[in-house]
Amino acid sequence: MSEYSNKKNEEFSPVHTNKVGGSPYTGVIGWIDNRLPIFRIFKHEYLDFQVPKTLNYFWSFGGILMICLIFLIITGLALGMHYKPSADEAFNSVEKIMRDVNFGWLIRYAHMNLASFFFIAVYLHIFRSLYYGSYKEPRQLMWLLGITIFFLMIATAFLGYTLPWGQMSYWGATVITNLFSAIPLVGEGIVTWLWGDYSVGDAALNRFYVLHWLIAFLIVGIVVFHVIALHIVGSNNPSGIEPKDTRDTVSFSPFTTSKDLVGMLVFILIFVAVMMFAPNYLGHPDNYIPANPMVTPAHIVPEWYFLPFYAILRAIPDKLMGVIAMVSSIAILGLLPWLDFSKVRSSVFRPIWKQCVFLFVLDFFLLMYVGAMPAEGIYLVLGRIGTIYWFAFFIILAPLVSIYEKPLPMPQSINEYMDWKKKGKIKTFNFTG
Amino acid sequence: MKNILKILIIVLIFTSSLNSAENKTKLLEPNWTFDGFFGKFDRASLQRGYQVYKEVCASCHSMSYLSYRNLGEKGGPEFTKQEVKAIASQYEIQDGPNQEGEMFMRPARPSDKFVNPYPNINAARVANGGAYPPDMSVLVKARKGGADYVYSVLMGYTEDVPEGISLEEGVYYNKYMIGNKIKMPKPINDGSVEYTDGTQATEEQISKDVVAFLTWAAEPHLEERKKTGFKAVVYLLILTILGFVIKRKIWLRIEPKV
């Protein structure tokens, strides 16, 4: 630290020294690289970059999410050229895309299903971090950036779902924007301001469309930060042990790239199969009925990926408290690096925490199921139990387990970890392929 | 801990079975030609289906997203160009204004949208006892159960109404309709239409044909989608296997014998 502060003045000296050169390349690439070091950076960060050699297929989801995001933007761009964000024309323009635009059906189904698969991948990505303790020192900021991305994803997915202007679009938008009315005193005013009108309508749809685009690109921005941070702190790995030297690591290319490629291809295969053979399976049939403010659907349900949080919202009888619970159920993830202060990262060596994480996953599915059901009877009870566990996992279990859990004996290095695993001394998932 | 997991899983399965018990009436599931990985429409069935729509449904139900030209397009009923022209010209649509500023009627062309049976929604309501006959363009996709559901509703009219259900004037009992009440009188009976291709016009056959037609109308690119999908899946499968082999080979450099 002190060394850095001594150097500070020198490094930020106003006298600019032009340093052309230093590229490992020659020829045209070298000429460009000497002036704009993109090739050098690429080589450093994507070819020679050292990655723990124990990474399993759970580590493919970062790359998979990147692909999802890129294809969402490309398909979104194409859709945007044909879509009309007006209450009268939105539904018609989507039907026109589906019927008359060249490959419009393919582009729309791809965009629609990619959104779902983006969430599948992000949930697995988050699970990976929870299970292997990737949120811990020194990766807290990456974790926080990740949660920011998740919040933005929720926002943009919600806005995107309103755009086809079907019944679920309209009523989902009405229900969710109405949540803001729970804010004391200014709530009603805020809702009117959000709508730009006294009900969800043309004005709201238009701004939803603009914000849907804007947030997509905000996500790209935060993703860049997320990735830069990754290249500073390095990847965690199933053992949770930091690599010590190059004996513990492999270079990003061709090792990680070839493995990620397999993960991506399997993911794309499943995605394409769903998109081509059951394109509407993950959607709701009511969204093929044009929005009608006079007819409320029997059950207003959000997209499947919001159901766990919807269940938490409805588990609490008071509207304002429900909204607070729903938002904090995600925000609380951000506190995890400080609530779970166990020095051991990976659940492989944490017998009790491992069970807590599995229960948390089960709780996630329980809440998802409850969220799809009417809020009454047994579902309300289950929803409340699920909500209690959700918060207890962070506030009570994480710190308590950190204090009282006795971690299993740990290997000294990644190499030793692999050795132990080969000898069957470590029991864990086998997703190494 | 393991026991808690087991109990929770059992509770989940139990509650989900409770829920499935609620949807007591199981939908009829005829063998659709368009189901499955190699699903395709039966052209003759789609053509008959259009005839049913035209002669039975079209007097109340619009199909406003379809144009007459769609009837001749690939993957649909594939009527010939002349047939499509002939079909379109049976309808009159309002066009204009002409150079005198007058609106005028002219025969429809293949590029025109299907003519609506009613000038507006309110007119449709008044004519149908307050119930608005839904547009049929995407009807199959807009109902849970899809083609099976629409077919089941068509076949679900019964004379013997279960006890405890009272029907007002102009309301009919239907086994499969959500809520079991429907304002549409039984639309299809044996011989409701007369097929020209020699197919027996039974209630099942007519219903099947018209639902096939409606499925095509809701998803006109279904055949293309499944065909492309199959190719894409095979291609990706091969690519994935190749990718895996390559990955294995590369990783052998650091982990000899796996």
Image (tube, helix red, strand yellow):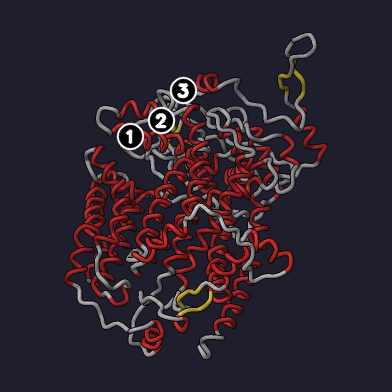
What residue is at 67 percent from the left and 53 percent from the top? B223
- Determine whether, in the image, residue A358 is placed left or right of residue A36: left
Residue assigned mark 1: A180
Horizontal and vertical percent for residue A160? Answer: 49, 42
Q: Earlier in the sequence, mark 2 or mark 1?
A: 1
> How far is mark 2 from mark 1, CA to CA?
9 Å
Where does label 2 land, which residue?
A: A194
Helix, strand or loop at mark 1: helix
Q: Is residue B86 left or right of residue A350?
A: right
What chain is tagged by disc 2?
A
Task: Output the chain of dot 1.
Answer: A
Badge 3 crowding class, 10 Å Cα cut-off, few under 14, some 14 to 19, many 20 or more, is few
Q: For the N terminus of chain A, which image quadrant?
A: bottom left
- Tag 2 and tag 1, C-beta contact below 8 Å: yes
Q: Quadrant of residue B109?
A: top right
Q: Which residue is mark 3?
A: B130
Q: CA distance from mark 1 to mark 3?
A: 36 Å
Q: Nearer the viewer, residue B19 or B151?
A: B19
From mark 2 to mark 3, how far is it between C-alphas? 35 Å
Chain letter of disc 3 in the image: B
Residue type pointed to by label 1: Phe
Q: Residue at horizontal 70%, vertical 41%?
A: B195
Q: Nearer the viewer, residue A355 or B104?
A: A355
Q: Position of residue A373 (x, y in %)?
A: 33, 47
- Contact, CB < 8 Å: mark 1 with mark 3? no
